[in-house]
Image: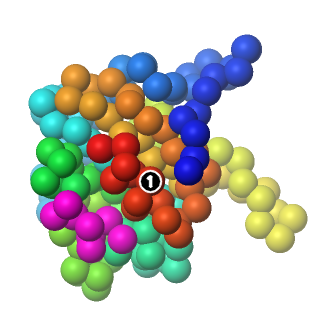
């Protein structure tokens, strides 16, 4: 099982860790609602950041949360997926895979930067900026309970469930 992220001495400013207050945000959802973390007080939140709608790993991750959503709800938690894709892209992705939780659009990248998940990545030797697949479990008081950095999709749902 993955360990919680720990800040090494001299960790980059802005790195979030267990016990930190989760940065508040207000983002548009796939249903054109604005969802704010501050309005979730009293609920546990599974906040997962993923790179791109309708790609193999992101689809597998979203479908695992979809399939286990009722169990997550029974544990008093909600799921929020965040990527930099548009609201329109989220609508298509949600409809195509019958997702049962909100997908939030962070097109201006303020939230991915606040959570430290917008990072330099490399693919076939080409460097580019993108979301590093990361999940935050946030407690009822808005504090970060667990960080899953560099998520491997297989088995991730079970890791998250164990944390709730």
Q: Residue at x 15, y 45 (%)?
A: 76
For the C terminus, give its image quadrant: top left
Magenta segment includes 68 = yes
Q: Which corner quadrant of the image does residue 136 belong to? A: top left
What is the crowding at mark 1: few (fewer than 14 residues within 10 Å), some, or many (at least 20)?
Answer: few
| Residue closest to the eye, 56 or 8 | 8
> Which residue does the numbered mark 1 point to in the structure image?
159
Q: Residue at x 15, y 54 (%)?
A: 73
Question: Which residue sits furthest top?
Answer: 10
From the top left corner, tell me how far across and down residue 2 is, in percent: 57, 47
Q: Is residue 117 left or right of residue 53?
A: right
The answer to whether residue 125 is above or below residue 120 is below
The answer to whether residue 152 is above or below residue 47 is below
Main SS of the magenta part reads: helix
Q: Which corner quadrant of the image does residue 89 belong to? A: bottom left
The answer to whether residue 154 is above or below residue 36 is below
Q: Residue at x 20, y 29 (%)?
A: 140
From the top left corner, tell me how far across and down residue 7 is, in percent: 63, 23
Q: Mark yes or no: residue 51 visible.
A: yes
Q: What kind of element bears circle 1?
A: helix
Q: Residue at x 12, y 30 (%)?
A: 42
From the top left corner, tell me how far across and down residue 75 is, in percent: 18, 48
Q: Mark yes or no: residue 30 visible.
A: no
Q: How is the image coloured?
A: rainbow
The mark tally for this picture is: 1
| Residue closest to the eye, 75 or 113 | 75
Which segment is the magenta one? 64-71
């Amino acid at each position: 099982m993955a360990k919680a992220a720990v800040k090494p001495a001299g960790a980059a400013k802005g790195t979030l860790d267990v016990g930190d207050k989760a940065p508040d945000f207000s983002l548009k959802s796939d249903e054109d609602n604005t969802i704010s973390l501050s309005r979730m007080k009293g609920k546990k939140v599974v906040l997962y950041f993923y790179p791109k709608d309708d790609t193999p790993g992101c689809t597998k991750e979203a479908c695992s949360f979809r399939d286990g959503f009722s169990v997550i709800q029974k544990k008093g938690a909600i799921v929020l997926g965040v990527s930099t894709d548009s609201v329109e892209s989220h609508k298509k992705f949600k409809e195509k895979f019958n997702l049962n939780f909100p997908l939030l659009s962070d097109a201006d990248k303020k939230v991915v930067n606040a959570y430290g998940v917008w990072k330099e990545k490399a693919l076939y030797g080409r460097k580019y900026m993108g979301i590093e697949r990361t999940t935050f479990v946030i407690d009822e008081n808005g504090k970060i309970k667990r960080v899953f950095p560099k998520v491997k999709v297989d088995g991730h749902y079970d890791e998250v469930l164990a944390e709730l």
